[in-house]
Image (cartoon, rainbow, N blue to C red):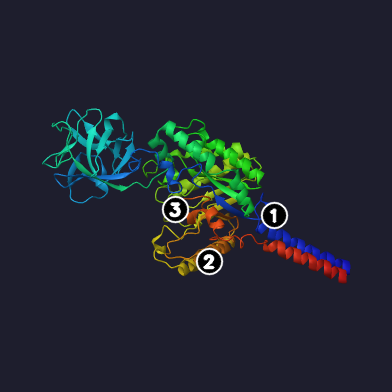
Amino acid sequence: MEFIFCKSVFAFLLSFWLIVSIAYSVEGLRCNSKVRGVNLGGWLLVEGWIKPSLFDEMPNKDMIDGTEVQFKSVTLHKYISAENGGGTKLTVDRDSPSSWETFRLWRVSSTEFHLRTSQGNFITYDTKNNIVSATASTPSLTETFYIERNERKRVHIKHVTSGSYLQVSTTNDITADYDHGVPGWDDNAATFEMTIVSNVIHGDYQLANGLGHDKAKQVLTRHRNSFVTSQDFKFLNKHGINTVRIPVGWWIAFDPDPPAPFIGGSLEALDNAFSWAQLYDIKCIIDLHAAPGSQNGMEHSASRDGSTSWPLYISQTLYVIDFLASRYARHPAMLGIELLNEPSAATVPLDTLISYYKQGYQIIRNHSSTAYVIICQRIGNADPLELYKANIGPSNLVLDLHYYNLFDNYFVNKTATENIQFIFKNRQPQLQAFNDSNGPLIFIGEWVNEWNATNSTQSDYQEFGEAQLQVYDDASFGWAYWTLKNAELHWDFEWNIRNNYLKLSYSQKTPLSMGVLWLGFACSVYLCSML
């Protein structure tokens, strides 16, 4: 009787352990744990805000690709305008600027540019009829203009091939027939005031095109060799991090000679990351952060000027996924591949995205039956449930949610307490709802210990970080902090740890399942010995 009872206790505990370990572990990670990760942002994919010094050696660096500018005539006191955002001739008849009066720069050299309208047309000059219009669909030498600047924000705009300066007429037209030689900087028809509205895009395209191939290669080689090293993996291992999420750009599949202006070398650096990860018992998630054509128009998608056309390049994107899967799927440090980062809900239709995700899933499965396939939610006006219920694939599928108490007007002027309460009142119930449903595993692939709360103390940050760790630890796949290193200190994981702003003790505790099991096992041994 006693033997039967002991067998029953042991069987119950074994069954309990199997259920708990399956529910709360990720295949391939040590100790049946979940992902406790850090993103290696700004390393193999440039984001200027993460390391602004990359752009220090660029001439005319406030006029990079994607910079938005407006031109005001100093004689008419009106703005150059592309009616309807492009498609007709230019006029100079607007008292105040808006989208039609805003042009995006495509940099040809430090002083020569193409000028793109809000609807995607380029300014061109018809030398035969002396008409300046916004009618070109693609730029060439005919659409190239030299912009001369002075210290008072005044500019002259000269057509490169004809050598003619643009000027305004008394009838509010703009022509290229200034016939008084080189214009001065006084109030004349060929002088304009240029306003830089925005130049926030500082990605791989801007860096490489702005510096030129040879200089960009020097800068990026130095950066890739120093920004992340094997010692960083040692640091991560020491602090309980078991996974790195590594953002890459699509041109990595064409290394060492990717299409211009992109610079080769990121593939070799990714190989190094896998070697360091294997050395320090860390797993890797490769994240396709920048897809051809740009999936969201942001600098981390390598957009040239903020525009997006990724749905036209799905087959090329699948080629990149196949390249990455074939190269790394069987590597001991491989954990998974993220098919696309933050596609925009405004420009990427849901059915298009689901179709792509299904094809990408199958490509990875062709190379591995166990590698995790990670799909990212759309950013903007989109519900994560749209992908959770999409039936992308049957096994080892993960949905990536990005949780920031930033980038939304809701968080403006919120106190530290209100930010912390939001984590528990909004994020925690959503995660619990996902965990209770039959769908993909959930991954908080990006979060940060930063907010809009002003006058925050170190204690405030510690409480905010602990709240996030407590809640995000419940994600069935795990989480990854954004990012390892950053010029903005509270985004810098290493700085947060070293300066005690983020405490990982909560996340490093012994998993409940293991603690309960050992206690239960000890109790069962004791009970059996007493019978």
Name the mark on residue 31.
1
Q: Which residue is drawn at 23% across and 50% down?
A: 97
Q: Label 3 to label 1, Cα distance in Å?
A: 34 Å
Q: Earlier in the sequence, mark 3 or mark 1?
A: 1
Quadrant where the N terminus is found in the figure? bottom right
Name the mark nearer the viewer: 2 or 1: 2
- Choose top left, top right, bottom left or bottom right for residue 31: bottom right
Which one is earlier in the sequence, the residue at label 2 or at label 3?
A: 3
Asked if residue 136 is positioned above or below residue 511 in the image, the reply reads above
Residue type, numbered disc 1: Cys
* In front of the other: 327 or 16: 327
Q: Mark 2 points at which residue?
A: 463
Q: What element does badge 3 sit on?
A: loop
Q: Toward the viewer: 433 or 358? A: 433
Q: In this view, does 87 lie to the left or right of 318?
A: left
Residue nearest the viewer, comparing 415 with 154: 154
Neighbourhood count class around disc 1 (C-alpha, 10 Å): few under 14, some 14–19, many 20 upward: few
Eyeballing the image, is 486 above or below 136?
below
* SS label for mark 2: helix
Q: Where is mark 3, residue-wise?
A: 379
Three-letter code for the amino acid on which mark 2 is drawn: Glu
> Comparing marks 3 and 1, which lies closer to the viewer?
1
